[in-house]
Amino acid sequence: MLTLPAATFTVAAIIGILGTALFNGLALGARTRNGQHLDVSLAEADSALDLDVDRRLDEYESRLLDCERTRARLSAELVAARAEIRDLTESRSSLQAGLAEASRVLGEGLRPMSSAAVLDESAEARVRLAFGSIDQVRTLIREAITALAASFRGLQGAAREQNALAADLAAANRLSDSEAHMPTIADYIVQAEETFAGFVEHSSASSSAAAHMSGSIARATERMLEVTTTIRDLDEIAIRTNMLALNASIEAARAGDAGKGFAVVARAVRDLSDRSAAFNTRLRKLIEPLNEELAFASQSLESLAARDAALVDELMGKIRNLSSEVRRSQDRMVGDLKRVDALSISIERDVQAAVFGIQFDDLATQLLTSAWGALRDVLSASEERTDSASLPAFASSVQQHHMRAGEIELFT
Amino acid sequence: MNAPVFKPNTQRRILTVDDSPSMRDMISFTIESAGYQVVVAVDGIDALEKARSNAFDLILTDQNMPRMDGLTLVRELRNLPAYARIPILLITTEGDDDMKAKGRAVKASGWIVKPFSPQVLLDLIARLF
């Protein structure tokens, strides 16, 4: 489809072409008619040529008439088209004016809608909800962070206390040279072993002494047996002496008065023999329990020496086991202390990382405060139906998008 | 033994200024752990009042605070003879060159962009003392 300007141009071009053809046709017709008069005599001579010229002229005239009719028609159409174009132009102008007016009116009407933060009731309620939620989040974060900060403070305090305790224990176990004057568990073990070695030595010496004493008692017992045998020999001698004294008495009696003196001697010998027998009996009674005592003492000493040796062996075994246990325990404790030490350092590091992380609160709170302020501005603008262009510029001072350590710079 | 050794340094007094309770707590927790004495202020006005009535060896201040921001506080402090030369560090969420230029203009000693490592802060303080 042609647009109006294009249609106008096309019609003008056609009229132009037709106008030129008409002018040329008229000029050509004039020349032809003059030639016709000039060549009458010649036409007679060449009637065929005349006839042809007439025919051509007729054709031209006919065409000229056609052209004229076409021109007239086109001219009429052109006039109509121009009228139509004029009408359309007027309509367009009118429409443009109407549109401009409508736009102006609409713009005026829409301006508060488009540039001011005018919210409908539902949107305003949602903004208020968001407003409240942000406030709620800020409160929650603040309370959580306060609790977390207190918790980390306690954790770090406990870690440091644990670290100090581990350091004390380590010093006591000579893990550190800071308190070298303090005796260690190893020192106690060495001292205990030395003390017990002294005790063992003393016990061994006692056992040797007991064994030696037992030998002495055995030898004394043998001597006592010899003494007993001797007493038995003395008994025999006393019996024989008594028999001899009895025989002497008998012989003295048989000799009569001559044997009276001999009878006195025989009686005296018999008295000595009786006294000797009584002495032997008393001596035997004294020696026999002594033998029993010596035997008992010997057995006791032997038993004591044997028991001491067994006890020393048993105690030595126990002390060795105990020392090994204490050394193993100490090694375990040293290992545990090193682990506690490492854990304390790890906790300290973790607490530092947590303390670093807590700064998200400040960043988040600042962002929430910005969002809160922006919403408040929108809400105020909506309530007051003010132009949003009058709202303060909105920009957050928080540039961070991640919890990565920020830059530090000292100004010189 | 690799455990950190915390030697109390009770001679140094540090004023830390931040409107965020958690940041105040975090900074005072960190520097108290290293043995420094800490006083906290909630904004520039509060800090200025405390600085006038106490002596501090170092001031750490947030930038964005109600009532008086960090840059204004630094400018005000530098006008006080007692604080003309002591180190004052700005701690902020903003790290662009324009803001740093403003920091230099008010004669701040340095600029720390949040978040920062507590240990890095302690190292920085140790360098300043």
Image (cartoon, coloured by chain):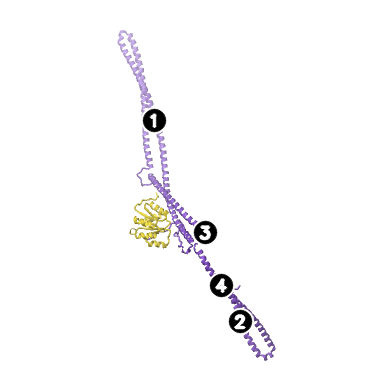
Chain colours: A purple, B yellow
Same chain, labels 2 and 3:
yes
Q: Chain of mark 4?
A: A
Tell me if mark 2 has few (under 14), some (14-19) or many (20+) residues whose alpha carbon lies within 10 angstroms of its own: some
Badge 2 or badge 3: first in the primary sequence: 2
Tags 3 and 4 in contact by the CB under 8 Å rule? no
Label 4 sits on a secondary structure element that is helix
Q: Which residue is mark 2?
A: A19
Task: For marks 2 and 3, give the one nearer the viewer.
Answer: 3
Tell me if mark 3 has few (under 14), some (14-19) or many (20+) residues whose alpha carbon lies within 10 angstroms of its own: few
Residue positioned 66% across, 84% down in the render:
A61
**Residue A18 falls in which quadrant of the image?**
bottom right
- Residue A187 x, y percent position in the rendering: 37, 42
- Residue A56 x, y percent position in the rendering: 67, 85
Q: Quick one: quadrant of the C terminus of chain B?
A: bottom left
Q: Which residue is mark 1?
A: A304
Give amino acid for label 2. Gly
Q: Say above or below: A334 vs B90.
A: above
Q: Which residue is mark 4?
A: A94
- Residue A219 x, y percent position in the rendering: 36, 26
Badge 1 or badge 4: first in the primary sequence: 4
Front one among A253 and B106: B106
Same chain, labels 1 and 2:
yes
Tags 3 and 1 in contact by the CB under 8 Å rule? no
Give amino acid for label 1. Leu
Tell me if mark 1 has few (under 14), some (14-19) or many (20+) residues whose alpha carbon lies within 10 angstroms of its own: some
Q: Chain of mark 2?
A: A
Tags 1 and 4 in contact by the CB under 8 Å rule? no
For the residues labelled 3 and 1, the Cα–Cα distance comes to: 109 Å
Residue positioned 65% across, 88% down in the render:
A33
Q: Chain of mark 1?
A: A
